[in-house]
Image (cartoon, grey):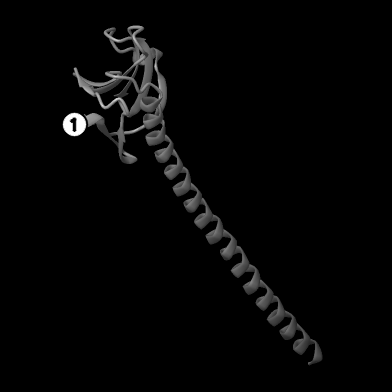
Amino acid sequence: MRSDGRSAVFFYRLGIAGLFLAGFFLLVVFGARTYRSIAAGQEQNGRARALLSYLSVCVKGNDTAGAVAVSETDEGPVLVIADGSSGYAVRIYRDGNRLLEDYGKTDAPLNPAGAQVIGETEVFSVEACSGGLFAVTTDAGRTLFHVKSGEASDE
């Protein structure tokens, strides 16, 4: 009879240890899943902020009179940022779900094959408002920027 009592206590202790071990593993799994979700959200937020900030920096880096313009193509709007009076410009536009930037002659056709991918977005709209104010909208949200030259042109 003594051995039955010992085996019952052994199985009881083994059951309790197994229960704690199962709880520990569940905590690890749920914690890892939560961490992965938070990290993905932070990464998406970082990409969104970087995309909108990049657009604003591109415009402000070439802020001279008449340098920033919005032109419309069959594919959608193109943000054209002229490089001084060289006849060349940085052109930012959407091709598929990618936001692209290329550098070329201002009046040359867009070259998506040779363009640099800035980010991914399903939405890209540019609006030139009065007084040099621009509104750019992407999946990441909407950003407003004001060109110091105060002269925005619509092509």
Q: Is residue 16 above or below residue 109?
A: below
The residue under the point 27% across, 18% down is 66
Three-letter amino acid code at disc 1? Ser
Count of labels shown? 1
The residue under the point 37% across, 35% down is 52
Nearer the observer, 145 or 1: 145
For the C terminus, the quadrant is top left
Q: Position of residue 41 (x, y in %)?
A: 44, 48
Nearer the observer, 36 or 82: 82
Residue at label 1?
A: 130
The image quadrant that residue 99 belongs to is top left
Judge from the rendering whether residue 143 lies leftward or rightward of residue 19; answer left or right.
left
Query: Which residue, as the protein is rendered here, is positioned at the far bottom?
Result: 1
For the N terminus, the quadrant is bottom right
Q: Is residue 20 above or below residue 56?
A: below
Q: Position of residue 126 (x, y in %)?
A: 24, 30
Could you tell me which secondary element the residue under label 1 belongs to?
helix
Q: Is residue 118 above or below residue 107?
A: below
Nearer the observer, 30 or 65: 65
